[in-house]
Amino acid sequence: AQSVTQPDIHITVSEGASLELRCNYSYGATPYLFWYVQSPGQGLQLLLKYFSGDTLVQGIKGFEAEFKRSQSSFNLRKPSVHWSDAAEYFCAVVMNRDDKIIFGKGTRLHILP
Amino acid sequence: KAGVTQTPRYLIKTRGQQVTLSCSPISGHRSVSWYQQTPGQGLQFLFEYFSETQRNKGNFPGRFSGRQFSNSRSEMNVSTLELGDSALYLCASSLDPLARARDEQFFGPGTRLTVL
């Protein structure tokens, strides 16, 4: 069955440090890929998405993600985190255009002052 | 433009009862999807409605049902509540499900259901 794996449940980084959150998927073809962020008590907000084309995509809040077909990965990065980035991050895929979205279990990001 | 609204925001019920949650999509959005979020299972897709028709359904028992009205507002119902139904229920709207993969889904803040 198709799946999305976020291997890190929790990640802690210092404010100003760089960040990389990992996401791997299992599927034969290239899916549609998304990263969402959820702040405490809030719904999900889309950070960025990849459908095709340039494998490095830019999103909101200074985030970017790189699609690597050979590794079935879609890792999220930010060069310098801010305290306000503390939240839970979800990677998600849609396998076919008419299919349901599948979410990873999420990575909770903690920021040290 | 107002965002996705969900009512109520918090709900406490006891086992065996039933509950109805409501979702109002962004104006002009015709697709509404429902998700259950729990610490153990994460975010799981419940179902999706478009033009008052269920288009997709996740792997949940028949106790979970939904519907969509002509104004695109949606409700989900859970009958015979179990302790394991305690969760955050999220609703998301988008313009057109056939373009869903290319359209952003806008999420509401969720309804926190506690079953005692």
Image (tube, rainbow, N blue to C red):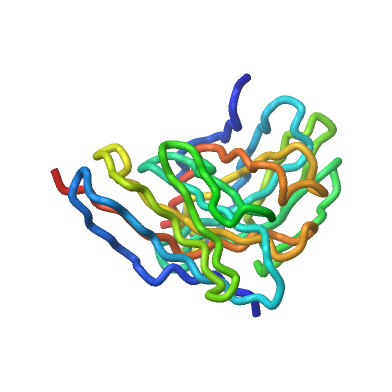
Task: Residue at 61% x, 63% y: name it.
Answer: A102
The answer to whether B51 appears left or right of A32 in the picture is: right
The vertical placement of B36 against A30, above or below, is: above
The answer to whether A102 appears left or right of B29 in the picture is: left
Q: Quadrant of the C terminus of chain A?
A: top left
Q: Percent position (x, y) of residue B96?
A: 79, 41
Say which of A105 and A94 sits in front.
A94
Count the marks.
0
The vertical placement of B44 against A24, above or below, is: above
Say which of B22 and A95 sits in front.
A95
Say which of B50 and A20 sits in front.
A20
Task: Residue at 75% x, 33% y: name it.
Answer: B29
The answer to whether B23 appears left or right of B115 in the picture is: right
Task: Residue at 72% x, 51% y: name it.
Answer: B101
Q: Percent position (x, y) of residue A65?
A: 49, 54
The answer to whether B84 appears left or right of B60 in the picture is: left
Q: Percent position (x, y) of residue B19?
A: 59, 48
Task: Residue at 34% x, 66% y: name it.
Answer: A9
Q: Residue furthest front?
A: A54
Q: Determine the image quadrant of residue A15.
A: top left
Q: Percent position (x, y) of residue A109?
A: 30, 53
